Image (cartoon, rainbow, N blue to C red):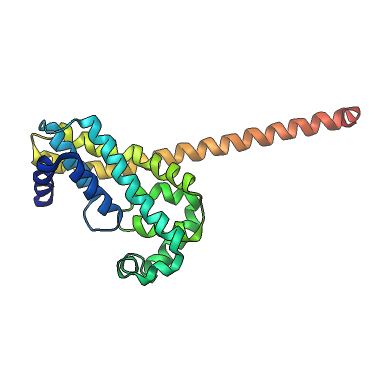
Amino acid sequence: MQLLEKLISVFTEHDYLAVFLVLLICGMGVPIPEDITLVAGGVTSGLGYSNVHVMVGVGMAGVLLGDMMMFMIGRHYGESALRWRWVAFLVTPQRQELVQIKFERYGNWLLFIARFLPGLRSPIFIIAGWSRRVSLFKFLLLDGSAALLSVPFWVYLGYYGANNHDKLLAWVHRGQSGLWVGLVLLIVVVLFWIWRNRRDAQLLAARQANATAKNPESRG
């Protein structure tokens, strides 16, 4: 509650720029919750200090730029980035091992899931950069898709709960659970879509093979 009130106070005085800068440093691993920052931005819009739709855009820009900075640090400096104390603090040996395990389990989809893993988000993006698993375009596609779910959700939650901070915090906690449920459902839908496309492709290939076998002349 105290952090939310402080952020609201800062944002009402400095508006979009403050929201953008706080989100930027959130992306760099500073322990300020991104969801609370976005909610605070939404609250300032609900109180009439800013436009909520513009705030969503500012939130997207701050989130994606912060994430991209982490990715590019990994891409340009590789493991030598660990010489910087703040990077070494974020990417501990234990976190490196945990991130590698998660990459083996989820593949590049981990870059989408990372949006919902606050403690591991920055290490995941840095490691993804130095491992060169994906291009910058694919990184932004995966990370941006996740941000399109989370950023508007938190900003509009703050906007509609601007006049009742106590209830708002309760909604924040429920919203965190709701986002996880939504994420799981989205992953299930995507996996089903991939499975169905592969199955259809296999059936089509089988039919074409049967047709070729029945009509040998068509081979020529």
Please state which of residues 84 and 113 is positioned toward the viewer in this rendering.
84
At x 35% / y 55%, what residue is drawn?
121
Please state which of residues 110 and 179 is positioned toward the viewer in this rendering.
110
* Quarter of the figure with residue 203: top right
Q: Is residue 112 above or below residue 193?
A: below
**Image position of 155 (left or right of 87):** left
* Quarter of the figure with residue 195: top right
**Image position of 213 (left or right of 93):** right
Q: Is residue 129 visible?
A: yes
Number of numbered discs on residues: 0
* Quarter of the figure with residue 204: top right
Residue 37, horizontal then vertical, whole percent: 20, 46
Residue 127, horizontal then vertical, whole percent: 43, 60
Residue 55, horizontal then vertical, whole percent: 23, 35
**Image position of 123 (left or right of 104):** left
Residue 168, horizontal then vertical, whole percent: 14, 39
Quadrant of image for the C terminus: top right
Q: Is residue 108 above or below residue 78?
A: above
Q: Is residue 173 visible?
A: no
**Image position of 160 (left or right of 218):** left
